[in-house]
Amino acid sequence: MKNVGKVTTLFISVQGSSARIEKESFSLDTRGIVEDKYHDTNINRSVLLTSKASYALANEHGIEMPFGALGENILMDYNPYHLLPGDQLRIGGVLLEISQNCTMCDHLSNIDESLPTLLKNDRGIFAKVIEGGVIKKEDVVTLLK
């Protein structure tokens, strides 16, 4: 086990809105983020983890966007994109297992045409919830090996 970073910002999606809602904390169960509109839709895509490095990369190329614009649920100061399916992270009381890389969404082109290409391998990574609990801002991210 190794502490690798911390949670900086949390977001959920709500029914009837495309806006991301920033939260201080949220609860998760094995079907995803309890309050999120995608809860219990696809357990392998339950939680989208994104690194602040993605926003820094975009910014280096003159693309400014607010946190949450990449669709993440958890923004952290740790870059998880090298992790493989099956790798596990503990964040707060929650155990997450990496399930797949995040695919590019059409909405990223609405922010900037070059964004999908620029962030091809740096947009985010999906995880499924193995053990539910609560995740809060500032929680430590621990890599389990």
Image (tube, rainbow, N blue to C red):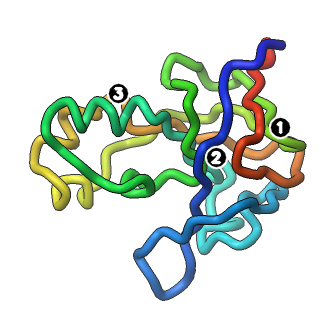
Q: Earlier in the sequence, mark 2 or mark 3?
A: 2
Counting from the top left corner in percent of width and height, residue 108 is at 25, 53
> Alpha carbon of mark 2 to alpha carbon of mark 3: how far?
18 Å
Q: Is residue 104 left or right of residue 143?
A: left
Q: Residues within 10 Å of mark 2 (few under 14, many from 20)?
A: some
Q: State the residue at coordinates (68%, 67%).
A: 39
Circle 3 — which element? loop
Q: Which residue is mark 3?
A: 121
Residue toward you, 18 or 65: 65
Residue 45 percent across, percent down from the top left: 59, 50
Distance from label 1 to label 2 (Cα)?
14 Å
Residue 123: image quadrant is top left
Residue 93 horizontal side relative to residue 79, left or right = right
Amino acid at dot 2: Asn
**Horizontal side of residue 58 vs 19, given as left or right:** left
Which residue is the extreme one toward the left? 113
Q: Secondary structure at mark 1?
A: strand
* Residue lying at 76% horizontally and 19% vertically, measured from the top left: 3
Between disc 1 and disc 2, whose residue precedes?
A: 2
Q: Is 39 rendered above or below residue 125?
A: below
Give the number of the disc on residue 22.
Answer: none
SS for dot 2: helix
- Tag nearer the camera, 1 or 2: 1
Q: Which residue bears the numbered disc 2?
A: 44
Position of 57 with respect to 11 (left or right) is left
Q: Which residue is mark 1?
A: 95
